[in-house]
Amino acid sequence: MSLSLRPTSRRDFLKTAATASLLPLPAFVPSTALAAPDRTGANGKIRVGLIGAGNRAKWLSRCMARESARAELVAVCDCYLPQVDALAADYEQSARAKPQWTAYQNYEEMYDKEDLDAVIIATPDHARVRAAILACMKGLDIYAEKPLHFSIPEGRALVQAVRKHKRVLQVGTQQRSTANNIYSCKFVREGGLGRVDTILVMNYSGAQPATGLQSQAIPEGMDWNRFCAQAPLLDYHENLHRRWRRYDAFTGGPICDRGSHALDMVHLAMGWENVAPTRIVPTTPADNYWGRGVRLYYPDGTVVRLESKDGPAFGGIFIGQRGKIEINRGRFACNPTDLLAPFEGPDTESHVANWLDCVQSRKDPNAPVEVGHLITSVSHLINICRIVGRPIEWDAANEQITNDNEANNLLVKVRREEFDLPAF
């Protein structure tokens, strides 16, 4: 076998760092522990593209601006081009610098034309995995917003693509890089409460059917076909565009959005990085299936209850032998109050920085692809249990519902052929 020589791009140069194996990284390791000598291209910066220029992109672009010494946002893509202009205006105001990026409406064109090292994917839920798998095939590292996927089988495909192509993927569950949350979760994980029997999580709802909406004119600058992506090509309506988080054509709803943060803290605190519930049971009647309460039964006997609209928005209440602790975003509270000493030090959050650390070091980030897949899968299973209104039993090894064929069939979402997942 002969070796061919070709010019080295920035991405090729960065990929030489991938010869190191990908090692599992404990989620509580701070990003500063992962730093490695810079391995980027000629200008010394990681070249990053962004897909999805909506509200979340404002936070992400500001994070990138803080990392300008080692990374630059060189391309931004959105199906609705005026949204890219709005992001540019926000960036200029917040970063006090004019953005130096090229605008695209089709991320495949962006992948082909730009010499990228990495990509941030902040699309609606249903479009995320296809963009991420194509990024893997292009040799790009990925920051993917949560929830990581729109169905469990496509999430498994993404895990396989990331590992096959040896990419770094960080899921946007940023509390894994928040100092206060790392501290409180570590306390629970290391036995500070003794045995934990029950965990209370806010009962976030699922999504609703996209019905009863009158067709409206597609606004100028919108590629509505690409916005719908794998979903059915619905008639345009402003609510589908601006409030897509409500509708099951595009998302699993709040349980997959904020609920993924809450469930992520539960899994991090309990050390369930590879542990799924074995049984999910509906516990409250509901006129609308998306609001039904459920209980999750884990292999160690712990029960996670989602039955109340009260409680921490981004965490849970852990009830153990020695007391209770409520973990929320950037804070915690204990009963008894002296159960855990107050957190000392700056309550920093460094999730994008941790991702860039790992792009350079080739280590796994704080929220690797397997963790994001597991947490998102639990959210989807909650929705499926609500829909059928019956207990479901989950075989995590084979990712199948074993006791209910109707429920098992809901694992798969039909895709339009034009937006099918690529063979990788």
Image: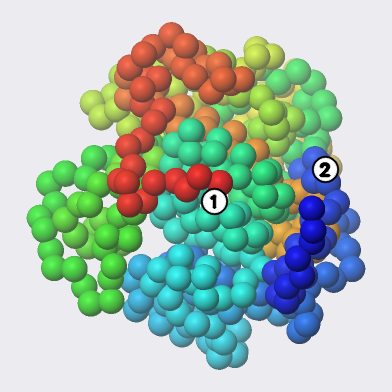
At which x and y percent is residue 58? 51, 71
In primary-sequence order, the first of circles 2 and 1 is 2
At which x and y percent is residue 9? 70, 75
Residue 337 visible, this angle: yes
Q: Residue at x 71, y 59 (%)?
A: 355
Residue 145 visible, this angle: no
Q: Is residue 5 left or right of residue 370?
A: right
Residue on which the image places disc 2: 23
Q: Nearer the viewer, residue 297 or 24?
A: 24
For badge 1, the amino acid type reads: Ile
Secondary element type, mark 1: helix
Q: Residue at x 67, y 44 (%)?
A: 164
Q: Residue at x 74, y 38 (%)?
A: 185
State the separation of the CA atoms marked 2 and 1. Answer: 21 Å
Q: Is residue 85 left or right of residue 358?
A: left
Vertical side of 31 occupied by 392: above or below: above
Determine crowd level at label 1: few under 14, some 14-19, many 20+ residues with C-alpha closer than 10 A. many
Colour setup of the view = rainbow
Vertical side of 78 occupied by 237: above or below: above
Q: Which mark is residue 133?
A: 1
Q: Nearer the viewer, residue 44 or 372?
A: 44
Hey, which quadrant is residue 290 in on the image?
Answer: top left
Q: Is residue 48 left or right of residue 307?
A: right
At which x and y percent is residue 105? 39, 72
For this orientation, the residue located farthest to the front is 1
Q: Are marks 2 and 1 in contact (CB under 8 Å)?
A: no
For this orientation, the residue located farthest to the top is 403
